[in-house]
Image: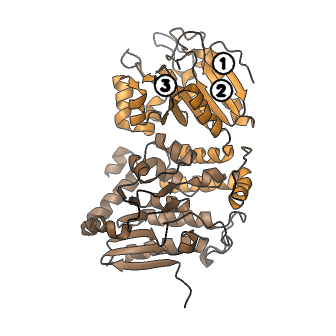
């Protein structure tokens, strides 16, 4: 899984970190083939113990300008739901990639630089952590240019940053620089350089991955639950998931040393 | 001298102070203490003389978390038939239940956090209506750094108290917050200088709560908590 064959998407697995980079040599726009590849990578990463964190990045100083003008051929998987007539294609491949990335319970980090727009910003928003370089500019111009943003971002964004600011981004299409994005918590941290971002990711790769997964399962799984159902959900997760690293965690605490986690 | 009381219950006018009192353990909580905390809140809620319920800790810290050295297999008789993971003991199940009781009392609830407010102390804080802290408090959930279980209700509560975006540093990255940071997240309502006796400096705040109309407060709080789980039209009914 060290090299992907999909044009426009570069992947590398090193030291527990699976880096997935948009890279088409231009403005890193995303097409159907890239969405399909990204979804497959996420699903495989969930079952691959060598992956302890996924980093979604751009290249050449830019994250991605969003959806490609020509999305390429409609994926075979969705052939039975290919729209007919005057409507444009439904955003099924977009939703599916977003769903796969969001459903990856391991740590996910988006590293934003240059432009992060539209569909690319959607993908960043389903990651757990968004880091931005000082030059990052974030926006969603879909409504301003007459297309609906129906990828699932309308559910995700109000929960992420509050409805008030979500309206501003999705409906007004304002461009936010890194400082403003940090202020409204669209991103959680500004990093000075790409190396600094990589260091944050490398540190997350040493964390107890299974513990991250059971935390995340609870947060995401309980977004739509009432209180009592959420308590039952937590108990169920506690009874059906094992965190092997817990033994090392408690041992290290007793011996007053830094733990060495395997991620299991 | 008789054995120290692990949980102090004192009234200051209409304010009921429930105070963790194992200062030599930084008020680390063992299974039976969870039971005492929950019961103390239920009793305070039922006591007509009480208008505000305050949780705090005696000594250097509010609460350092669960007592990992405690006998995890001692638990209240009423739960003796509960099957639990013996490795983890009943503590987590008791915390889940008592933190639920704390959350649902009708009266105003306030937690005063100084020194440390970690792990299950952090979890209890999320069940209170208001969180007051000293500037230098060490607040958060370090359980992630020990790969420990944290499945007692914080996951429902935290994401409704602050934006999901802030859940990542607080819950997944296990960030230690000081007063200013927690205030910046909107999690802590008032921050006081390091070294303050919170029961003293919070007096005006607690007095304000004690003066509120209990029925209006209870009904609004109930509607807010219930409303979190309802659709708009259902919430209007």
SS at mark 1?
strand
Question: In the drawing, does residue B103 fall left or right of residue A214?
Answer: left
What label does residue B25 carry, if any? none
Quick one: label 3 or label 2, which is nearer the N terminus? 2
Q: Position of residue A215 (x, y in %)?
A: 59, 48
Task: Spot the orange chain and give its letter.
Answer: A
Return the residue at label 1.
A10
Query: How far apart, in angstroms, are the residues tagged by discs 2 and 1?
Result: 8 Å
Q: Are marks 2 and 1 on the same chain?
A: yes
Return the residue at label 3.
A121
Q: Position of residue A189 (x, y in %)?
A: 49, 35
Name the image quarter holding the C terminus of chain A. Answer: top right
SS at mark 2?
strand
Q: Position of residue A87 (x, y in %)?
A: 46, 13
- Is residue A229 in sight in this rendering? no
Residue A135 vs residue A208, the one in the foreground: A135
Name the image quarter holding the N terminus of chain A. Answer: top right
SS at mark 3?
helix
Alpha-carbon neighbours of circle 2 within 10 Å: few (<14), some, or many (≥20)? many
Quick one: label 3 or label 1, which is nearer the N terminus? 1
């Amino acid at each position: 899984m060290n090299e992907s064959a999909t044009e426009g998407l570069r992947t590398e697995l090193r030291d527990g970190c699976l880096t997935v980079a948009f890279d088409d040599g231009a403005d890193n726009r995303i097409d159907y083939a890239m969405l399909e590849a990204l979804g497959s990578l996420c699903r495989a990463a969930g079952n691959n113990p060598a992956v302890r964190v996924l980093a979604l990045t751009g290249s050449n100083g830019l994250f991605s300008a969003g959806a490609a003008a020509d999305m390429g051929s409609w994926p075979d998987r969705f052939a039975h739901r290919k729209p007919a007539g005057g409507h444009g294609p439904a955003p099924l491949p977009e939703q599916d990639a977003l769903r796969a990335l969001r459903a990856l319970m391991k740590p996910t980090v988006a590293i934003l630089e240059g432009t992060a727009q539209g569909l690319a910003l959607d993908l960043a928003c389903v990651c757990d952590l968004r880091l931005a370089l000082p030059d990052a500019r974030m926006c969603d111009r879909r409504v301003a240019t007459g297309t609906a943003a129906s990828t699932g971002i309308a559910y995700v964004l109000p929960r992420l940053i509050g409805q008030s600011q979500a309206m501003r981004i999705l409906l007004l299409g304002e461009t936010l620089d890194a400082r403003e994005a940090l202020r409204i918590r669209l991103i959680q941290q500004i990093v000075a350089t790409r190396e600094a971002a990589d260091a944050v990711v490398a540190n997350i790769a040493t964390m107890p991955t299974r513990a991250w997964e059971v935390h995340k399962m609870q947060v995401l799984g309980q977004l739509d639950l009432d209180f009592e159902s959420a308590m039952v959900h937590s108990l169920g997760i506690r009874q059906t998931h094992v965190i092997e690293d817990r033994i090392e965690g408690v041992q290290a605490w007793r011996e007053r040393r830094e733990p060495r986690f395997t991620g299991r | 001298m008789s054995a120290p009381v692990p949980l102090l219950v004192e009234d200051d006018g209409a304010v009921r102070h429930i105070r963790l009192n194992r200062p030599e353990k930084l008020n680390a909580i063992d299974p039976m203490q969870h039971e005492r905390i929950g019961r103390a809140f239920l009793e305070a809620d039922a006591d007509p003389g009480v208008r505000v319920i305050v949780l705090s800790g005696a000594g250097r810290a509010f609460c350092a978390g669960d007592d990992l050295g405690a006998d995890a297999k001692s638990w209240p008789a009423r739960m003796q038939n509960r099957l639990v993971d013996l490795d983890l003991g009943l503590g987590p199940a008791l915390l889940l239940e008592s933190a639920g009781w704390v959350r649902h009392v009708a009266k105003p609830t306030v937690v005063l956090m100084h020194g440390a407010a970690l792990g299950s102390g952090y979890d209890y804080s999320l069940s209170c209506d208001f969180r007051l802290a000293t500037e230098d408090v060490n607040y958060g959930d370090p359980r992630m750094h020990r790969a420990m279980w944290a499945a007692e209700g914080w996951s429902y509560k935290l994401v409704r108290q602050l934006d999901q975006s802030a859940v990542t540093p607080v819950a997944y990255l296990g960030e230690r917050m000081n007063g200013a940071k927690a205030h910046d997240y909107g999690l802590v309502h008032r921050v006081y200088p390091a070294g303050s006796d919170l029961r003293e400096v919070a007096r005006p705040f607690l007095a304000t709560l004690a003066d509120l109309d209990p029925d209006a407060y209870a009904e609004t709080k109930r509607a807010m908590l219930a409303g979190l789980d309802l659709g708009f039209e259902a919430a209007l009914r």
